[in-house]
Amino acid sequence: MAKRKRLSPAQSGYLSGAPEGKSALSGALVTAVQAKAPIAQVASEASSQAALQELSEVLRSARARGLMIEEIALEDIDETHLVRDRITQDEDDMEALVSSIRSRGQQTPIEVVPLSGRLDGKSWGLISGWRRLSALRRLYAETSEPEFARIKALVIRPESAQAAYIAMVEENEIRVNLSHYERARIAVRALKEGVFATQKKALQGLFANAPRAKRSKIGSFVTLVEALDSVLYFPTAISEKLGLALVRQISDDPGFARRLKTLLQQSARSLPAEELAVLNAALEAEQMSLSETLETSAEAAAPPAAAPRLRQAAGSEMARGERVSMQVAAGLRLGFTPDAQRIELSGTAVDAALLEDLKLWLKQR
């Protein structure tokens, strides 16, 4: 018969190492979790910091590329940072813009560049958006409402002064219809500011996207700006046709610009129409004087029988098909066939300028 083994009684302190109510296994798990908690916290903080840095970089890049709209106090903006290409502002257009911003708020941001070291406290220089800035300043002056004290702006950083001027011109070319005089004036001023080395480079840089013919006309108006900018009150009212005619006269007769400048200074001009009347009258007087000079030169240069023959032709007493031809000026010959009702001009002096002069003379005849 097998001998039975006697079992020892249970030891009550066997599990005394474990906290009350917990097993040894659960204590080990708690210890492990507690040991890992700092690592998880560090990882979480590192991830948050990386995300914050990434967001900061995105914002910095967006701001640097002019993609972020910011709100800037009106008094912090220097609207004279660049010489403006706009000379005058139509009051009706400005009133419409003011009303729009009053009812709907500012819809399109302006463009500014950061400034530093300014004694006047201005920290932003205006590139484009002069009308919007002026409208908000008017609204704030009228209402003192805080919503009109700040303006939405894109902060850009042009690589050079040339890029800043080009940005201004391109923005205005898209939004408004500048006159040829205003376009020429900004080219002249940009050259004087040293932004461009030559007038040709100024025109090519500022109006690179304009058709060549348009750029050529702007270049012609440069002559008008250089000659009369200091005395004109309403230069934007000068039409393309009148401006080009004045430029031709100034180019043909250097003394004309001086005489016209004196005439303008002596004339009362409170309205654009009054200034245009002075310009047109001066041009017509010069054209009349030119016509009289040409007639005198033609009579003096004609052979003894030429003048009688010309008068005879005018009286239609010539034989059928007969043609009178005479030299009326250097490089200019006149031909007249009465029965064919034809007058011809030929020679090296026949060019586009002469054609325009003839058009003006015929209109005044």
Image (cartoon, rainbow, N blue to C red):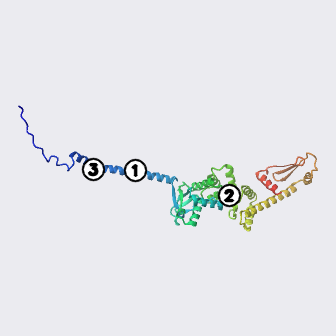
Number of marks: 3
Kind of residue at disc 3: Gln
How many angstroms separate mark 3 from mark 1 (CA)? 25 Å
Q: Residue at x 59, y 64 (%)?
A: 138
In the foreground, 337 or 324: 337
Mark number, residue 181: 2
Q: Residue at x 65, y 62 (%)?
A: 91
Nearest to N terminus: mark 3 or mark 1: 3
Image location of residue 221, percent across then percent down: 69, 56
Which is more foreground, mark 1 or mark 2? 1
Question: In which image quadrant can residue 251 be found?
Answer: bottom right
Task: Note whether residue 362 is visible.
Answer: yes
Kind of residue at disc 1: Ala
Tell me if 319 is positioned left or right of 77 in this view. Answer: right
Element under label 1? helix
Which is more foreground, mark 3 or mark 1? 3
The residue indicated by pointer 1 is 50
In the foreground, 47 or 278: 47
Mark number, residue 34: 3
Question: In which image quadrant can residue 252 be found?
Answer: bottom right
Image location of residue 291, percent across then percent down: 82, 57
Nearest to N terminus: mark 1 or mark 2: 1
